Image (tube, helix red, strand yellow):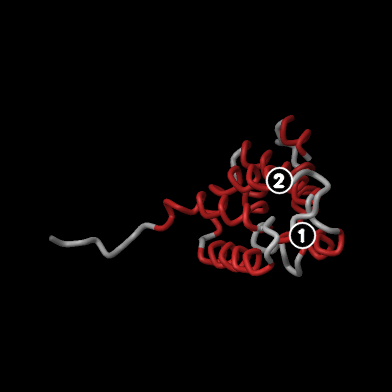
Amino acid sequence: MAFNDELDASTYRVDWVRQLLTLFADRDEKVVSSAWSALDALVKSMDKEDLEELVVPLRRSIESTLSPGSEVPGFCRPKGIQPIVPILLAGLLSGTQEQKEQASYGIGDLVQRTSEAAIKPYIIQLTGPLIRVISSGTVAAQIKSAM
């Protein structure tokens, strides 16, 4: 009997994003740190074109992680949102209409759950593409309302 020693890990990316983001809200700093490292490694291992598939599950995970106005420990640490930003930007700049809309909402959800000090280094990186998308003449109404 032969075993396939190759495993297509891409099948589990969405599950990993969901689970790891949930752990960003854990009270134990070791858990948060491990989840952050794992998400960062996952995002860095992916091609930019593949990040778009994570936009909708990422946004839903952010939305369900604590309530708006509550700071998520994993987001508020130094470089806390670094692994999340590339996914949102991929959806915003090259995703489908739904991915652009969800990325826009995701940015808003992220801002509501991140401390001012932690989000400040990413403001230009996030707002520049939002302005670029909104100023293009082909933006759907639901994307404009999400922004």
Pointer 2 local density, CA inside 10 Å: few below 14, some 14–19, many at least 20:
many
Find disc 2 in the rendering and name its residue.
106
What separation in Å lies between label 2 and label 1 (alpha carbons)?
Answer: 14 Å
Find disc 1 in the rendering and name its residue.
125
Tell how many labels.
Answer: 2
- Residue at image coords 59%, 40%: 96
Q: Residue furthest front?
A: 28
Question: Is residue 20 rendered to the left or right of residue 133?
Answer: left
Query: If you read the primary sequence from the N terminus, does the residue marked by circle 2 or circle 1 appear first?
Result: 2
| Disc ID at residue 147 | none
Question: Is residue 66 rendered to the left or right of residue 20?
Answer: right
The residue closer to the viewer here, 105 or 64, is: 64
Q: Residue furthest right?
A: 116
Disc 2, SS: helix
- Residue at image coords 43%, 55%: 10
| Relative to 82, residue 50 above or below | above
Q: Nearer the viewer, mark 2 or mark 1?
A: 2
Horizontal and vertical percent for residue 105?
73, 41
Q: Amino acid at mark 1?
A: Gln
Horizontal and vertical percent for residue 15?
50, 50
| Relative to 88, residue 45 above or below | below
Image quarter (top left, top right, bottom left or bottom right) of the C terminus: top right
Pointer 1 local density, CA inside 10 Å: few below 14, some 14–19, many at least 20:
few
The residue closer to the viewer here, 146 or 5, is: 5
**Quarter occupied by residue 117:** bottom right
Q: Amino acid at mark 2?
A: Gly
Disc 1, SS: helix
**Quarter occupied by residue 59:** top right
